[in-house]
Amino acid sequence: MSSNMIPQHLQIRVMHADDDIVVIDKPANLRSVPGHADSPTDTTIKLKRPSDRLTAVEAWIQAIKSIPDDDDSYKNEAIKELLHNIRTTNNLSSIPRKLEPFARYVFRNRNRLLPSHVDDDPDSSSNNEPPQKMQRKDSNLAQNTEQSYMMPPWRNVADEAFSIIQQLHKPLMNLPTPTEDWESAQGQLRLRGYGDFTSENSYNSPATNSGSEKSNLHVVHRLDCQTSGVMVFARNAESASKLCKAWRERDAVQKTYLAHVMCWPPYSEQNVEEGTIELPLAASRTERIKWEVRQLCDGGKPSVTKWKLYKGEESGEESMTKEGVILELHPITGRTHQLRIHCAEIGSGIIGDSLYGDSPVPWVNETDQQKDPDQSGTDASKPAILRLHAYMLAFRHPRSGDELTFIAPKLW
């Protein structure tokens, strides 16, 4: 899907872009980064995996066993011989499942895996020229060293063989369907030409080479799928490193969220207009994607949120209305679902919260995503979106050091 075909209510808005960063306003119900298209309808932990699903090791062994002996697509006889001897290895689980260890494995076992080509250049068999003797600069080159396995022809043959096994391996894993680019903020930036994915978060596309003219998109932080607001991505490794360091240093980044709650006892009952919530949090022991309040002595992590009544973007705007209270939240720590849990523990929870709130909305699946929800939410008890918005983000530019502040107005 091209960027101009994305449903309007799911389109990101680029607020700022330069050679180092790109800042966006993410809409609600859009993932921050690529993931899996399957919706998390069942959040409970499954102690046993489905019987028809193989583990990674089982699938790897099955893939090796399924390697065909006679395949005209093999580039040369060396690759054919290597794959045959790998398939007949006694202990298939010992064959590495990652490229670098696999290449070293091939080089260390070259006398067994490539007996006919130990002294020949395998690449030469792809043309009509006779095989050429491998050039050995000295006796150490033939030894199992860190450098030797990376040199042609060993690396060329190992790379090709690994690729063939990997192609057989992936379908056996029965992995969830990856999302398309338009289904995430990072993916939409890629569609618009702001960069490609880095290897650590690539799903639909490989990372670009370090020498590529197109920059990479590095994840600095994330917003929940249902949360809207300001996000920043780095466009090179150096900027990503500096920004991630700033995010770890709590005083280096200022974040302000707006949350709409139906009931807030500290204000409605005690007339308190600001305060601090300190409730330690930990991953739920019973539900896969949820977190919960848990004491520090029981594994909880310190979690602190400062709050105050929101005074409004325009003079005269009320913080408390017949539809609830709008809060200004400043997370000091950054635990998963921290703001949503803290609001639920103190008051009624954020309006539209499908996990912790008193007035939840169902998970938005792929079909529902393409329908434009009622952004106005005239009935506060039945909102179309989660009323949690990343309103303001302030940080120093990773290259110039200038203080940058970005504000995205709420849509509700």
Image: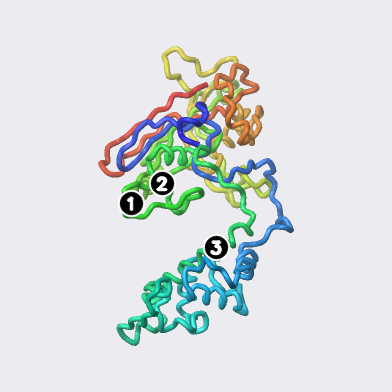
Q: Which residue is mark 2?
A: 196
- The disc label shown at residue 350, or none: none
Looking at the image, which is closer to me, 118 or 252?
118
The residue at 39%/28% (across/down) is 407
The residue at 70%/56% (across/down) is 49
Percent from the top left, x then y, of residue 152? Answer: 38, 73
Label 1: few (<14), some (14–19) or many (≥20) C-alpha neighbours in 10 Å: few
Of mark 3 and mark 1, the one earlier in the sequence is: 3
**Quick one: SS at disc 1?**
loop
The residue at 55%/22% (across/down) is 375
**Quick one: SS at disc 3?**
helix
Percent from the top left, x then y, of residue 300? Answer: 58, 48
Of mark 3 and mark 2, the one earlier in the sequence is: 3
Total numbered badges shown on the rendered structure: 3
Q: Which residue is mark 1?
A: 212
Percent from the top left, x then y, of residue 307? Answer: 49, 30
Q: Which residue is mark 3?
A: 166
In the picture shown, does residue 12 fall above or below 44? above
The residue at 41%/43% (across/down) is 250
